[in-house]
């Protein structure tokens, strides 16, 4: 069993999928901590419901990324976290965490990287009128969605597809793919 921290910024649907997989025994991980940069985000409530400790912070209350990452690092060490799992965390990871957790930070992104990196990948795919997009699970490096790909799964975009309908399809794939990929990854470490 790996001790993990899940970083999230929003509603926490991927966090919930990971927590559910762990409870069912489909993911050999202990979620030791949820880290959230938006104290009023719904993922905080989800963590509380799961009885998982949550560290929330407001980045603007710190002098910079290095300062809040040092605070996060302290919390990760207190909880003996071995892996960081990004699940809708909308901040780039900086040098403090990258150095400490090199090769042990994983992210999920709603596109077939390298296509449509960054924010609003689903909207970018709709705007580009491509016939397929997908989901990518990748290791995190210093760039935005540039780390080595672990696994990808395609999602077809149909004529007349809306951002909302595509988002629903993407989420369904994410919620199945992410726990499965994490399970394989943790089994090999």
Image: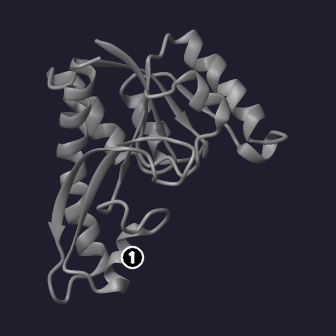
Could you say which quadrant of the image residue 170 lies in? bottom left
Residue sitting at the far right: 63
User: Compared to 126, does 57 lie above or below?
Assistant: above
The image quadrant of residue 122 is bottom left
What's the residue at 60%, 46% (across, down)?
A: 38
Q: Callout 1: 10 Å neighbours few (<14), some, many (20+)?
A: some
| Residue, disc 1 | 123
**Quadrant in which the N terminus is drawn:** top left
Residue beneath the point at 52% across and 24% down: 101
Camera-nearest residue between 176 and 23: 176
Describe residue 85's horizontal placement relative to residue 29 as left or right: right
Quadrant for the C terminus, please: top left
Nearer to the camera, 123 or 13 = 123
Q: Please provide percent x and percent y for residue 6.
A: 44, 32
- Dot 1: element: helix
Horizontal and vertical percent position of residue 148 = 37, 44
Q: Nearer the viewer, residue 32 or 181?
A: 181
Residue 74, horizontal then vertical, whole percent: 65, 17
Residue at figure coordinates x 42%, y 50% from the top left:
11
């Amino acid at each position: 069993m790996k001790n993990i921290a899940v970083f999230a910024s929003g509603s926490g649907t991927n966090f919930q999928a990971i927590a559910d997989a762990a409870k069912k025994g489909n993911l050999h991980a202990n979620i030791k901590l949820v880290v959230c940069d938006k104290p009023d985000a719904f993922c905080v409530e989800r963590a509380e419901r799961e009885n998982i400790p949550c560290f929330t912070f407001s980045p603007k209350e710190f002098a910079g990324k290095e300062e809040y990452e040092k605070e996060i690092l302290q919390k990760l060490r207190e909880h003996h976290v071995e892996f960081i799992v990004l699940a809708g965390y909308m901040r780039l990871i900086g040098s403090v965490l990258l150095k400490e957790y090199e090769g042990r930070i994983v992210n999920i992104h709603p596109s077939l990287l390298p296509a449509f990196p960054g924010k609003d990948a689903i909207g970018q795919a709709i705007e580009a009128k491509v016939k397929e997009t997908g989901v990518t699970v990748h290791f995190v490096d210093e760039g935005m969605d540039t780390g080595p790909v672990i696994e990808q799964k395609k999602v077809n975009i149909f004529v007349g597809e809306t951002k909302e309908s595509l988002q629903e399809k993407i989420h369904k794939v994410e919620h199945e793919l992410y726990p499965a990929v994490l399970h394989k990854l943790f089994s090999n470490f």
